[in-house]
Each structure stands twice: as C-alpha cells, then as structure tokens.
Image: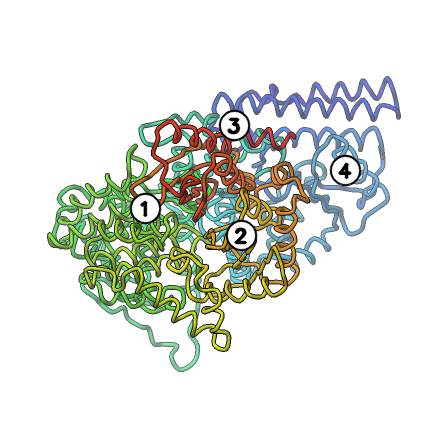
Amino acid sequence: MNQAKIPKQRAIIDRRALAGEISSLVDEYGEKARGAIVALLRDALEAGRAELAKRLAEKPASGHECSGGQAFLVDQLVRLLYDHVTQHVFPSANRSKNERIAVMAVGGYGRAEMAPHSDVDIAFLTPARRTPWCEQVIEAMLYFLWDMGLQVGHSSRTLDEMVRMAKEDLTIRTALLEGRYLWGDRELYDESARRFFTEVVHGTERQYISEKLAERDARHKRMGDSRYVVEPNVKDGKGGLRDLHTLYWIGKYIHKVRSAADLIEVGLLTKQEYKSFRRAEAFLLAVRCHLHILTGRAEDRLTFDLQREIATRMNFADRTGKSSVERFMQFYFIQAKRVGSLTGIFLAHIDDQFAKKRSRKGFLAAFTAKARTHKGYQVFGGKIGVPGDDWFRDDPVRLIEIFQIAEEEGIEIHPDTMRQIDRDAVHIKGPIRKDPRANALFLQLLAGRNDPETVLRWMNEAGVFGKFVPDFGRVNSQMQFDMYHHYTVDEHTIRAIGLLSRIEKGELTDDHPRGARLIHRVASRRAIYVAVLLHDIAKGRGGDHSVLGEQVAYELCPRFGLTKGETAMVAWLVRAHLLMSATAFKRDLADPKTIEDFVGQVQSQERLRNLMLLTAVDIRAVGPGTWNSWKGQLLGELYDVSQERLRLGHVRHGRSERIAATKALVREQLGDRAHLIDEYGDIYTDSYWLAETDDVIARNIVQYSVAQSLGEQLSIHCEYEEERGATLVSVIAADHPGLFYRIAGGIHLAGANIIDARIHTMRNGWAVDNFLIQDPVGAPFYEASQLERIKTAISDALANRVELAPKLAKRPLPISRSKAFNIQPRVIFDNSASNRFTVIEVNARDRPALLNRLARALFESQLIVHSAHITAYGERAADTFYVTDLMGEKISATERLENIEAELLDAASDSRQAELESA
C-alpha cells in the first residue's frame, strides 16, 4: 500500500516528536540514555500496534490499511534508530566514500505489507568494502531493534556481495526484488537497484520463473496441495497470499513493474482481474492481521479455534443452515479460488509470451504450424481457443461445450479463452440451463472417460459450474466446520467424481476390487456419476441434506436428460448415501437383523451396486487417510452378505448350516491341529461361531488350547492383520464383571485406538474378546516392542496395577483441536435393530479413552456388552454397543433406559473429563 494513503499517520507514530524526545534523553543522560531510548521506542511500537488494532476492529476488512500501517510504523522506528545511531552514538563528521550505508526493506516488509508480528527484513548495503564505522552502526541498530522485541531478519553486504549472492540464491534474489529504499544513502540504494536488474535479473527471466514455480509447487505439496483444506495457511497455503506474491514477483522480474497495478500495463492482468487481485489480497491480509492480533504472535494457520473468533471479529453472522464461521470460511475459500483462477491465467500468459519470443532454428525455421479447427474452435499447441470475442455471447451453450471438448480431447483451454469464459459466464441464465443440448454436453463431461475431475475443477474455478447448476453454486467453497471433512463441499464432490473415474479406468483396483468390477455392471453409468455429483448438494440448507438432496435430484435429473428410472435411482442414492457406511461401521454385521434391515431398505441388486460405489468414493474423497482396508473390508462384507440375500431372496444357509460351514472352514485352517475343534468346539456359543471369521476362530482356539496347557488365567495375543489394516488383539480370561472396560483402558494406555470389538463368554465361563486396534493416525501396530507394550498395558489394567481413570484422563488426544467444537453428547437406544440385543449408540466429542469410560458406565449399569463398534468422524466419536441385562434380555423399561442414558451422558461429558484431568 502507498504509505501516503494511510490516514492519520501521526496517530500511529509521530517521528518528529519522538526524535525530539530522543535528543532530550541524549542531552540529559548522554551515553546512559540507551535504556530510556529503548523503552521510549518500545512504547511507541506498542502504541502504534494498539492504534492499528483499534482501526482494524472498526474496519475489520481493511487489510491493506492495516498491513501498510504496520510497515509505516516500523519504517519510522528504523529511521529514528538510524538517525540516533549515526548522529549520537557513532557520529562521524568527515566520512570517507566507503563510510556510507543504505538501509533497505526487503521481502514482505519491502512490499510495505506486514502483519503485526511479521519479521522485519532489512538489508544493509555498503560500498566496495565495509569500514569499522559501518559495522558499528549496523550492529548498534540491530541491538536496538532486538531490544525492542522485534524479530529481525537482516543481511549486511557490499554491492559486489549483493550481486554475487543474488545470482546464487533464489530466496535472496526474491527478497531483493521487493527491495524498497528505507533510509540512509539514497545514491547507494539507487546504484544497487541498477546493478540488481542489469547484472542479476537480465537474461535469467526464464530460469527464475521455472525455479519460482517449482518452489511454489513444493510449498503447495507441503501445505496439503489444495486451496480447499479446512484449516488453511493464509500465507503459504494454496490460494493464499504467497501465491499472489508469486504473480507480482514474476511480473516484476520480467517486466520490471513497480506495483501489482502495473501488471495491467504489461498485459498480464485485465482491470477486472486486478480488482479481483486487490479484493482477495485485502481480505487475506485482513485475516492474517486478525490472526496475529488474536494470538499475539506470527501465526498464519487459520485453525478451527481461531476461525470462529475471526468470523465474529469480521462481522459474519449466523444464517439459516449456516453458522457465522461457515459463512466466513466460505468467503475465504471464494477468495482462495479467485487467487487460483488468477494464477492459472497469469502463468499461462507468461508461458505464451515466452513461446512467442522463441526463435526457430535449422531446417524448420521457416515452417509455422497452423491451428486445426474442431467444431468451430481453434486447437493449437495442446490448447483450445475461440475464433472471436463474441463467441460465447452469440451462443452461451458454448460455455459448456468448450469444457466438454477439452475433457474429451484431453486438451487445455487457452488463457485468453479462460478470460472470456470468466467474463461471459454471466450469460448462463434460465433458458441456457434448460437447453437440452447444454445439458447433454454437461452430462457427457460429468461422465467423461478421460479426466472429468480436472476439467470440472476448471469449470468450477471459471464460475461456469455454479452458474449452470445453481444448486452446486450454493455449496461452492462451503466448508463443513468439523475435523472429519478435509475439503470444501464442492472440492469434495469433484474429488469423488475423479475417484469414480479412476475406479472405472482400473487405476484403484487394489483398494477397490469390488468397485472396479461393479462400475462395469451398473445399468446406467451416467446415473452413478450424477448421484456422486448430487450426494452433498443440499448441505448448508438447515435440514437433513440427504432428504433435501433427494428433492434436488428429482428436479435436476430430468433437466440433465436422465430417464424416469435413472432419476429414481439417483434420488434414492442421494437419500440413502450414508446408509451403507452407517450400517457397516455402526452395526454388528454378524447379527441377521442388521442384514435384514439393510436389505429391506436397499431392495435390489442394482441399488446395492450403485450404493457400494457411491459410498466408497464418498468416504475416500473426505480426505487423506479416511479410507483404509478395514473400512473396505466391512463394506465388502456387508455387500457380499446383502448381495447373496437379494439374489436368492434369503440367506443361503440357516443358522445351523452357517455354523457347520464355519466349523468346516476352521477345521481346514487348523490343518494338523483340527482335533482342537473336537476338544473345544462345543464350549463356544452359536453367536461366537456366527460373529467371528474362520481365521480369527482358528487363532482363538489355538490360543485357548495353549493357555489351558500352560494353566494360564490370562492369555493375550497380538497379531498384525494386513488385510484388515489393523492389529488383532485377542484376550482370553476367566470372565468377570468389568473385564471389557479394563481391557479397553489398557489398550488406550498403550496409545492405541479400538476400531472394533467382539466380546464373547464361552459356555464354561471363560471370555474370548477380540479387538481390532490402530494407532492414532489409523495405522496398525506391528513392531514387536509395540505389541509387547499393548500386552503389558492390558495385563496391568486387569491386575489393578494401574489406576486407569486418572492416567487415561491425562493422555492427550492426538488432535487437541477438538476443543474448538461444541458437541453435545447424545445417546440413542434401538430395540428394533437386533432380535437379541438392545443397541445403544453414543455420539460425543472424541477424547482420551472415551470407550473405556462408556464401557465402565455400562458395567456400572449392570449391562453385558456383547459387541462394540467404534467409529470416529474427526472430533466426533460414534460408539455403538450391543447389550443385554444380566439375564440376557433386552432393556425396555423406560426408567431403566433413562438411568442408563444419564450414566452414559455423564461419562461422555466435557465436565467429567475436566474432573478426571484435575484429579
């Protein structure tokens, strides 16, 4: 920002008044004035920051004014220090030509854009060689700045050193590129600027761009490689301030522009694009300033706990279906998206400019390749363009067509054409949305066989997607304020479409073997693509997005050209898109009633195939690490059993036949030890044979036989399960009250998370409990030391060698940011989900050993837990228990259910956690 435009500058800092005070202190105290001067300037710094913070509070979006004001404040302090040091501390009446210093602001400070706690980047320039006087002045100034509490990044170089080091180091070159004269010898500064551009920049433009873009790509990868991550880095994240800076750096390096406004003059940005540049920059700068003021430090991560506070500071209010923080973050992502769009256009133009400068040599020097024509468009150099400025205005359907062609042909869209698209997207109105040709083209693009994900993302960033499908426009840049979803709704949806395309092309067969088969067996591939597009379309509307999305599907599908049958399929899929994951992850798949209820809702194999595909891509598109082999196995198990039930009209085998079939498989697994089934098979209950897989049963039987032969009262076996992506922990012990919650506590103390638990009591009174566990980031335990730690922790917990409650309470969650979310615990009872058990689902904030506390509450309520299913959605846990009373009956009495609910709510509450932590 031009500092002359900063209003009421003396209210921020009055340099003349301070200079007078410094002179008075020197006159009064002489050499002992230093401490008083540091205190004076420190107070001036704090007063200036306070004034700027007050202004930001009054005008919370004034990013340029605040960041420019911070730079102005530091400028005056540096100038005061230079004058004081050169006049009072090390005065020199007759300086030689080498006793000169130019003080230069570099980096962000050089751009006059500083957040309240940004580093102060200064370069001290000296002539051919440094003199003792120069070194004394520089050192004195730095100590003053440090004593004032400023973080200073500094360099001290001669002009020759500056040139040499700038040639060698990209970071130094970029910092100097933004150099601004601050104080001292102006002639020396001017000479440095001349030498920098003639000796460093000239002839290295292409190399600089290449290195700068490589640096940007590495930064993006480090930050998550998406501008739609829900905890973005305002400075370094994709779509953040650094991306805008990169445009300015490249423009300045190539065209020697002095400000971002000059990018218009050299044809790299239009006036409208520059306005977008400034709007995005102002907003991002304001957010960064708020971050620094709130935290009192140089914090650039927009974390969940800070998002809510900044939304309030920037005057965002709640609206129906969207909280203030969601509205604030949606606006943030709109700006980040605009930065991405500007970056793409800008860099493509730079590429074109260099391409025009390239001269051909040799035999083909006189040959000029001609553009080919495709459906009226011009295709040249792998890019598609249009023949005239009115192309889209004359027929707005072409705004859809060009993206469909780009996807089908595997080509990019020329930057000039993208500019036209961005400008002319306003012509997509009601008649175009209803146009059969436009909708047919859109459907071809959506279900394209090349790369629909990339082209739909271009379409979205150009503003065409949201204009053509306004319901999609409503979720554009919309975040979901939780720790489960990593991306905005539109980015999640586009990623899911890309995953479906990759599954269809056979690129993800290892992770999705069923999906790779099923995608080629669905009756309508375009219906499944539309279902993926619409599954989250109604988020943020203040109701159940599945139900509201079903209504949207019934409106949009006929418009897209889908048949009645396809429309009905899409609408059902949108309505039921959470059904399969909820059943697989929260219900006992060994319970026949689970399958019966699920199949009752699915009703057809065609629906089941489509739902399996939609569920897989929906989960995987949530973010890195959300899909794992354990989830794949659970969904696959549910699919296989349900498919058999739908195909035959019944489960192929009755209860006794299924038990006999499992025993036969276990016998085969045991091989030479098959006799163990004859010895111990009858002590296992029917429910055990139905619930566990044959490989787990085989291991349990061997483990039990070994424990019996050794006379062990407790046997713990841990084994890495590659197929399940988890570690199986089997505990065999004489059953006794509280066994389950103590085992769970021991596992948590060892640093593991339980993702599934099956609890069995054998006919002879022994317990066989099988737990699947992972580490806090969803990976299995497999090292011997890890497995031994788990065994020891369980053993100590069962033997009462540790006090579980206080130790568990002090174990921090791996993601402590969960405290930023207000989650009210909820308990749901379901006596219809199982014929034998009462199903209890507890939703609460995830925290250390939640399962242990819930299991203890169930134990103290005199309930027997038969299986537990543990699911985490970021900060929220959903734990499901299949229970009976001590007599093996369901719980139905209202008063009893109310008491159990009260105990579970207390165990899951934040206040209870606080009590335990303080114990």
Q: Quadrant of the C terminus?
A: top right
Residue type beneath disc 1 = Ser
Is disc 3 placed on a helix, strand or loop? Answer: helix
Is disc 1 placed on a helix, strand or loop? Answer: loop
Q: Where in the figure is residue 816, as x and y percent of width and height?
A: 56, 39
Q: Which mark is residue 834?
A: 1
Q: Which residue is mark 2?
A: 777
Q: CA distance from mark 4 to mark 2?
A: 44 Å
Residue type beneath disc 2 = Val
Observer-side mark, 4 or 3, equals: 4
Q: Which residue is mark 3?
A: 5
- Report whether 302 appears left or right of 841: right
Identify the mark nearer the N-term, 1 or 4.
Answer: 4
- Report whether 795 appears left or right of 476: right
Observer-side mark, 1 or 4, equals: 1
Residue 154 position by quadrant: top right
- Packing grade of label 1 (10 A; few <14, some 14-19, many >=20) is some
Residue type beneath disc 3 = Lys
Q: Nearer the viewer, residue 512 or 383?
A: 512
Identify the mark nearer the N-term, 2 or 3.
Answer: 3
Q: Which residue is mark 4?
A: 142
Give the vertical position of 462 relative to 66 (above or below).
below
Residue at left offset 57%, top offset 42%: 813
The reply to whether residue 379 is in sight is no
Q: CA distance from mark 1 to mark 2?
A: 32 Å
Is disc 2 placed on a helix, strand or loop? Answer: loop
Residue at left offset 69%, top offset 29%: 77
